[in-house]
Amino acid sequence: MKKLNVAIIGQGRSGMDIHGRFFIRDNKRLFNVVAVVDKIEARRNRAKEVFNCDTYSDYTELFGRNDIDLVINSTFSHMHYPITMDLLNHKFNVLVEKPFASHVRECDDMIEAAKQNGVMLAVFQQSRFAPYYKKIKEVLGSKVLGDIIQINIAFSGFNRRWDWQCSQRFDGGSVLNTGPHPIDQALDLLGCDEMPDVFSKLARVNTSGDAEDYAKIILTVPGRPLIDIEISSCDTFSDYIYKIQGSCGGLKATMTTVQWKYFVPRDEKAHDLILEPLSNEDGTPAYCTEQLKWYECKAEVKDGVFTSVVDEFYENIYNHMVNGEPLYVKTEKVRQQIALIEQIHYQNPLSIIY
């Protein structure tokens, strides 16, 4: 089996704890880490010990090598665009961490550079492979919930941050940091290339920086469900990530449990409209209510957001590069996500303080 040689730029939480741990699990089955780049010497030394690879303090030192099949750009968010462009123009295949970019024009530049140089450009949007999300799509695909009216997605909790993800200059904030996961899922569920209408509100609440740590995003497309996305650092009772309302039932989900209930319309005859006052058999006023036969289901799913989900994502990257399999997450679809994020920030200008 052909192995792909990989270089990783960045050994922070993403580069080491997500991508690096995958390559450790892969154990050189599909990928072989041949180079790691990081400005911090201690991280380079750790990478050399873990991967037995070459290490560099600057990514441009990779340019003299012709044995690298794939470069992973897991640098600071505001460096995704310039470094990825440089790599693409040096004819490297690139997998760039989320967020893809902060502006649509940057997405267009990278997509065009990849085409011009005949190389692959992919974005690390692994949440499409999450077991809870796949189960939700399976339930929606079964149509048992009827016409879907509203989908609530909440990636929330209570926390106070003080790292670089709080800085607008570093492309931090809830929307560009956490947002790519629920927004990617939302656009996938809407299933159209048409740009949704968006209402949004951003706020700085408990952050030490100048980027938002609260976001409310409402998406609408004619003929599609309304999608309500919340990314909040102020939610002390975050007990679900999905809540779905349909004409025949509903669903709620965490990352480990998906529950849904529904009735079967053919077994429950719809009532004709009555405009006269409703009465009980004894003539007393009656409330308009009925007893439906509900079917309740529950599925326990594996929480593999940083394990099995990453494995599946990289399997797709490998099969795309080696066997011509289509990318599961299309770069053009991620571009739509960034266009949406750009609009959200336009609607909510926050002053740059730091």
Image (cartoon, helix red, strand yellow):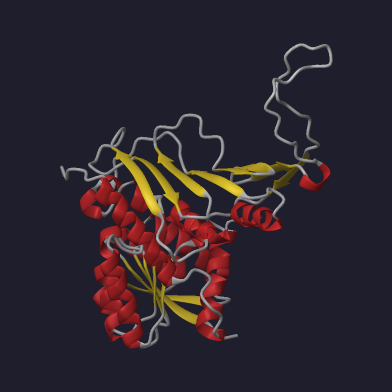
| Left/right of residue 39 with respect to residue 277 in the rendered view | left
The one nearer the camera, 158 or 2, is 158
Residue at image x 76%, y 17%? 279
Image x and y of residue 153, in percent: 51, 45
Residue 73, quarter of the rendered image: bottom left
| Left/right of residue 156 with respect to residue 343 in the rendered view | right
Compared with 135, 318 (above or below) is below
Residue at image x 81%, y 47%? 266
Quadrant position of the N terminus in the picture: bottom right
Image x and y of residue 97, in percent: 39, 63
Image x and y of residue 51, in percent: 45, 70
Residue at image x 75%, y 36%? 271
Compared with 228, 90 (above or below) is below
Residue 320 makes an appearance in the image: yes
Quadrant position of the C terminus in the picture: top left
The one nearer the camera, 200 or 38, is 200
Residue 57 makes an appearance in the image: no
Image x and y of residue 276, in percent: 70, 23
